[in-house]
Amino acid sequence: MASHFSGVLQLTDLDDFITPSQECVKPVKVEKKRGKSVAKIKIEDDGSYFQVNQDGGLQKLEKAKITLNDCLACSGCITSAESVLITQQSHEELYRALEHNKQMGAPQKVVVVSVSPQSRASLAAHFNLSSSDTARRLTSFFKNLGVHHVFDTSFSRTFSLLESQKEFVERFSRQEQDRTALPMLTSACPGWICYAEKTHGDFVIPYISTTRSPQQVMGSLVKDYFASQQGLSPEQIYHVTVMPCYDKKLEASRPDFYISTSETREVDCVITSGEVLKMLEKEGVSLGDVDPAPLDTMFSSVSGDELLRHAGGGSGGYLQHVFTHAARELFGEEVKELTYKTLKNRDFQEVTLERDGAVLLRFALAYGFRNIQNLVQKLKRGKSPYHFVEVMACPSG
């Protein structure tokens, strides 16, 4: 009995950005029976598949299904225990927390929602709104549901970028004494981290930046600084983040980010851009119809009507920020604009800083698992020429 694999499947239900579905690389096993001629497949208008038998009869075929147990958007297979943690995080859990607060005599929790700039941008594009207008309307929408505070994670992203700059300069200075100091690999993508830990373990982990992702920086700020400012303990806050990536649910569940003294997580629940859409649909409103509300000022990165921006895309702009800072800090060079050189494909590009024909800095971005695997193989062979690599599991970052 021969085994064959289907063509490309589409990740529709797992599509966290509000964009066309990504291609899935999960192979689906199809059993081929001997002694039968090749059957014809008929596709109906509703997308259902039928096998046309030799006698002209039609047999409906089941569609291949992909769940979070099979694939966590882009980080590969996850364990059953991890899938349980993920199912505990959804917009339904947020609704449950809000309903709990409405019950008489129930211990009240302060509900905080932190919205990522990537999710805000995709929702802005979906509803044809400006980024700042989207932020204000989201604030109004969540507060009308019973949320107490709505923050923007641009503040924590800036914090993460600054820490990454500092860490790179420190690693660059000790590269002669520590062979794993460089290349420094970014740590903001949980899909990449999940893959690195499970597949390459102790070999690749020393190369990975120790800087927290913007989500977890925000988690620490909310459950520590914000809590103390409000006279609250960490467990009295229910912290929700709105993120563009399902992998962030797994990141929030990591034991690293559990506050054992308070028996609470820094981020209690992660919902995606698509789940915010489901909430809007459930409430029967369009974001464009929601009256805007003033933004919360703590952790705010707002100046006038403009939210803090950076030149990066979904990746967060780590390469650009670290490169320009390192060029100035280490070599006194002011880099106004980066020139990216595409190598094997558009998801593998490099940027160099040269002086008198000598390369001072060589940075790269590696997006998608094909490029990540090539990067790791170069590291293992001692052939990686890079000082810094911005690594993202999803194609296009």
Image (cartoon, rainbow, N blue to C red):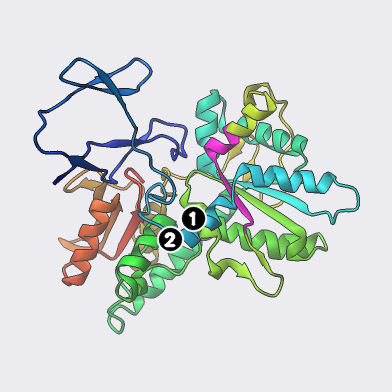
Report the amino acid beneath label 2: Thr
Q: Amino acid at mark 1?
A: Ser
Q: Which mark is residue 234?
A: none
Quickly name the residue at label 2: 79
Is 311 placed above or below 195 here?
above
Circle 2 residues within 10 Å: few <14, some 14–19, many ≥20: few
**Is 161 positioned to the left or the right of 392 in the image?**
right
Q: Which residues are magenta?
A: 267-277
Badges 2 and 1: C-beta atoms under 8 Å apart?
Answer: yes
| Left or right of 142 in this view: 317 | left
Residue closest to the far bottom: 177
Q: CA distance from mark 2 to mark 1?
A: 6 Å
Picture layout, residue 1 above or below residue 374: above
The location of residue 32, given as percent across then percent down, is 16, 39
Q: Nearer the viewer, residue 23 or 386?
A: 23
Left or right placement of residue 33 versus residue 79 in this view: left
Q: Is residue 113 visible?
A: yes
Identify the residue shown where x is 15% and y is 60%.
357
Q: Which residue is mark 1?
A: 83
